Amino acid sequence: MFAILGLASFGVIMVGSASVLYSQTHFGDSYYLLKKQLFAGFLPGIVAMYFLSKIDYHFWKKVAVPFFFVTLVFLVLVFVPGIGSEVYGASRWINLGPMSFQPSEMAKLAIIMYLAAWLESKGRKRIEDFYEGMIPFLGILGVMGFLILKQPDTGTLGAIIIISMCVYFASGAKISHIVSILVAGFIALGALIKVAPYRMNRFKVFLNPEIDPQGIGYQINQALLAIGSGGFFGLGFGHSRQKLNYLPEPMGDSIFAVISEEFGFVGAVMLVGVFVFIASRGYRIAKNSSDEFGKLMAIGITSWIIFQAFINIAAITAMIPMTGIPLPFISYGGTSLVFLMSATGILLNISKQSRLK
């Protein structure tokens, strides 16, 4: 709990630091995005985490199916004119009066909940069966994956596939089935990269970050400049230069580069260390869960946090192709923060009822 609250608090501070010039330039208020993150993400997230930590996690087994289908409806609504909105060519937002949110963030929790309930009801023998286990699993994943790919949001799709595979593997799936899905996934990823020019450009930049530094390689080159400029101890809080309209989305997907520039190698390693600590605690909660549903939920939620953090950090350090996926609890985005803290509340309740007191 303290690790999550610490990360979320640090995230609000870093959003404030990274977005000062962006907020002033676009909204005429240096603290516009800081206030939005605080009042639309951090405070509602804390309230959600507190109340969900008090609700018996077995309740979510009862609502897993309707929650999953409501999420699918929301994923469809992003394409409906007047309800969904398109930003930078992607349809990812729903506007409901003064409120707006991303259903894809809701989808991560929904599929964890649904798979945990469904796989527990199956039992190990049926999960190991090709027709009763693997085929229905791919069907569930395929329906949600198709809607997210249509937005398009390849980064979120990748995160959801990884999370789902972790839950599926932990439920007792055959290794041969896991390997088959992974091989098919890599083939599909190759096809997706080939058919979309922007994905192909990201792959080219990954292979050669120096290519076209003023064009398709601009973001990763500016991010690497920020990380390198931080040195061992950093330039100091608030002293990042790359956030001054050089680094795209400094308070969003690129925020790890700003953290590295201001706090250096030491600060970056400490941040990664917190995620490693959360991983160890989350998987320990899963190991000591009193039932299969709690175990699968804990594994799904922990994997969500850890693998999303890995994808974001790996992308911004040029270890994998660039993706548009936020750094959990840190990047700007109220929807992401609220759903992550809600999931943490569920994880805390699983911990309370675990065999290890």
Image (cartoon, rainbow, N blue to C red):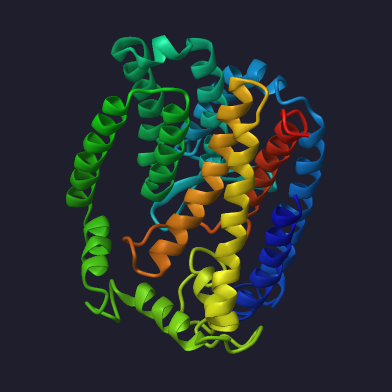
Q: Residue at x 47, y 36 (%)?
A: 80
Count the marks.
0
The location of residue 9, given as percent across then percent down, is 73, 63
Does 26 sit above or below residue 115?
A: below
The location of residue 50, given as percent across then percent down, is 81, 41
Image-based side of 163 in relation to 42, left or right: left
Image-based side of 230 in relation to 47, left or right: left
* Quadrant of the snapshot with the C terminus: top right
Q: Residue at x 40, y 15 (%)?
A: 127
The location of residue 232, given as percent across then percent down, is 53, 86
Does 250 sit above or below residue 102?
A: below
Foreground pick, 25 / 61:
61
The location of residue 316, given as percent across then percent down, is 42, 68
Foreground pick, 14 / 333:
14
Q: Residue at x 63, y 74 (%)?
A: 23
**Residue 37 visible, this orientation:** no
Image-based side of 347 in relation to 83, left or right: right
- Residue 351 is drawn in which quadrant? top right
Does 234 sit above or below residue 340?
A: below
**Residue 214 visible, this orientation:** yes
Does 50 sit above or below residue 234?
A: above
Foreground pick, 175 / 113:
175
Q: Residue at x 50, y 87 (%)?
A: 231
- Residue 301 is drawn in which quadrant? top right
